[in-house]
Image (cartoon, rainbow, N blue to C red):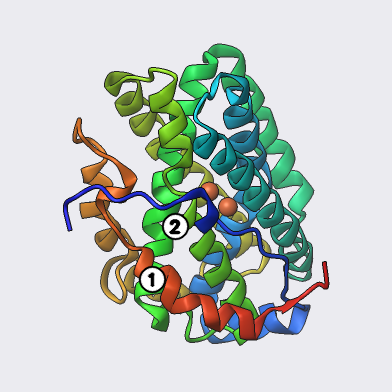
Amino acid sequence: VNKQQSISSEQIKIRHPEFQLNETVLREFRDREPFKAHFFAAMSLMFPTGEKFFIDSVRYYRDRITDPELSQAVSRFCGQEGIHTREHLKYNELLKSFRIEPERVYRRLEKKVAFYNKMQSEKTQLAVVLAFEHFTAILADILLRRPEILDGADPKLAALWRWHSIEELEHKAVAFDVYRSIGGGYIRRLFAMLFITLQFAIDLNVNLLYLLRRDRLLLRPSVFFEGIRFLFFRPGILIRLLPEYLKYFAPGFHPWKKNNFTLVEKWENGIRQLASPAGR
Ligand SMILES: [Fe+2]
Ligand SMILES: [Fe+2]
């Protein structure tokens, strides 16, 4: 299990799913489990800006990659992230029914990215991407390993999150391998992770509070207790991600030291059934 076992670039697949989400799907999830629904929505709101930053940062080094396998993996990484954004933009539009304005969130996050990009070198920006990718890989692993987390969600919405999770696992080492190939070091990687842990916590909370406030749920005790349970007890997302999070700080860390590709194989068929291809 501890042996490093990467996957080939062919295993990073570009899919063209069509989830046919609608307001009812999101509303039903919110009525059943408001905290959880808005927790997922808060993440969804981060993706369009985040994924554009990931693509730009990795693409910057494209010409310096000599290994054809890695360069193919980079193309596929960019392809996957681009399609994630496309689907999450649709998802986020539907959040308008909870009186929120996705464009406002994008503007705030874009300003922040631009601000930090001015101060940080391209190498540091790439180190930030790896750290983010580690977060998404941990969350993806939890989501696929514990399918009951999406129990209250419509199958279409669950399919979207499982599809995104599958692809995050498939490409989880791409940015990392690019970083290594351009001589990125341990200290920068470590500080980027500390930086991103703070930023991720801030942005997720800002989005979550915005959603809860606009949806007039902020002061409802039941929502508060649902949140405590979800984050700390059942399934206890925050507690569960901690051990994997800490592994990142080991000097010899590599994403594929945790081989969770079986989760991809396990869930892939479910996605194929639930998401009808767009016919491309
Ligand atoms: Fe993504
Ligand atoms: Fe990703």
Using the image as rendered, state which of residue 218 and residue 232 is in the foreground: 232
Residue at 41% x, 80% y is 147
Q: Is residue 245 above or below residue 63?
A: below
Taking the image as shown, residue 22 lies to the left or right of residue 248, namely right
Residue at 34% x, 26% y is 189
Badge 1 element: helix
Q: Which mark is residue 31?
A: none
Taking the image as shown, residue 239 lies to the left or right of residue 84, namely left
Indicate the amino acid at tag 1: Leu
**Which residue bears the numbered disc 2?**
169
Q: Is residue 218 visible?
A: no
Q: Is the CB of mark 2 within 8 Å of ligand 2?
A: no
Using the image as rendered, state which of residue 79 and residue 87 is in the foreground: 79
Q: Is residue 261 above or below residue 129?
A: below
Q: Position of residue 55 (x, y in %)?
A: 63, 37
Whole-Å distance between the Cαs marked 2 and 1?
A: 9 Å
Q: Is residue 236 visible?
A: yes
Q: Is residue 113 above or below residue 102?
A: above
**Which residue bears the numbered disc 1?**
263
